[in-house]
Amino acid sequence: MPEITKQVKEYNNEINLSTQSSNLIARIESIPFSRWHIKPRVIMGSATFFDAFDSLSLAFILPVLIGLWKLNPGQIGILISMGYLGQAVGAIIFGWMAERFGRVFSAKWTILLMSVMCIACVFAGNFNTLLLFRFIQGIGVGGEVPVAAAYINELSRAHGRGRFFMLYEMIFPLGLMLSAQIGTLVVPSFGWKWMFLLGGIGGFVVFSMLFTLRESPRWLISKGRFDEADRVIKEIEASTDERMPVTVSAPQKEVKGNWKELFSLFYRGRTLIVWTLWFSAYFVSNGLNNWLPSLYKTVYHLPLQESLRAASVTNVVQVIAVFACALFVDKIGRKRWATIAFIVAGLLLTTLWAVGAKTPSSVIYLGSTAYGAMGTITVLLYLYTPEIYPTRMRAIGTAFATAWLRLASAIAPAVVGFVLGAKGINFVFILFAGVAVIGAVLALRMIETREKVLEEIAP
């Protein structure tokens, strides 16, 4: 009898916890986007801005370092790749921290590490030192975006989540675009070290702002910290009197997350598809973005200022394309948009190969437009990946996925350097086109997540 009584109590306790969890999730889903949501989007967006700034800064510094340190194509590729290898490590480390200690906690330390190493790069006096500093800096850079993506996704309700998240995530391409413009102005006028200095100072400002953010209520619920989640939700509720109908109130219970669940029968297919999508998209986009300033200067022999200006066009095109994606992704759907964007990029890159990429103008128009199409996928994946995993492993699932983007971004520059030296510029673009075609095939295997409650997509 005592054993039966104990089992009944445990069952009733589990039902109670599940009910509490469901009620809290329902309250989150009932609150429309309000002024409360502005602060986390601005602060996390600022962190993401400097993540983008630090990621791209090297591309606009390299044309100077090539002459200053007499770098060959192989060294250029390795220097670009090393930062991305660090990012792959950082994504896993800080993704794990975000699951265990919280999204905001993890985000703080990614920004701190990123900023400290940005200042350290100012004092790098040779190739080997900068290589080491960029690797360590990459650990911080790689951890920030997946953690921020999980956090912002968890603050969103099902209806309009695509637009809400994509408008926030536009900060990343805006960061790339502004980094390009700043690099075009700062590097020729003040020197390459100022790019790192600006990134470091801005990062320290954002680090202080992160202490004012509330923790993700969904993460608190997943840890059974219902009172803390309730206080955060009450703050959100107090920001607006409006309430929206709740379509789904999925039962929730505290379950300990484990990275091995990524390969369980239910999630294995999702995991493998999304990993290959990240690899394909970023192999093309970061392969293009990181090499273009150097290509314009070394292959097409444009002056430094003109090379940087031509390279900055790609980021302007991406911002326009991502804004269009933000407006229409909830209507068109994640799967259809990604498939079409891969196909468009593949066709443009194939055309560039067919015409021989003989002039910088052809690369500026066709290459930049292809990059814009790919850029929408790279941002879309930050929306889609957190959607397909439950809260208990959302950050680590996103972190593992983004580790593949870092690996692709590390491999692509080295491959481009090899292909450029061995076969010429023409073969670089047909290589990118082939990877885009593979991405289109994989995108057809995505699940559609638009307008669905997160707990319904990933139980």
Image: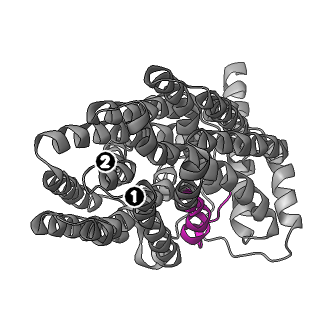
Q: Would you say residue 251 is visible in this rendering?
A: no
Q: Is residue 230 above or below residue 109?
A: below
Q: What number is the disc on residue 204?
A: none
In which quadrant of the rendered view does residue 423 lie?
top left
Which residue is at a point 43% across and 67% down the rendered structure image? 313
In which quadrant of the rendered view does residue 24 lie?
bottom right
Q: Would you say residue 276 is visible in this rendering?
A: yes
The type of residue carrying mark 1 is: Ser
Image spot of residue 346 (x, y percent):
21, 64
Q: Is residue 230 above or below residue 263?
A: below
Image spot of residue 159 (x, y percent):
59, 72
The type of residue carrying mark 2 is: Phe
Which residue is at a point 49% across and 54% down the rendered structure image? 382
Q: How far apart in space, not on screen, are marks 2 and 1 (Cα)?
A: 22 Å
**Mark 1 lies on residue:** 307
The residue stretch that appears in magenta:
155-175
**Mark 2 lies on residue:** 283
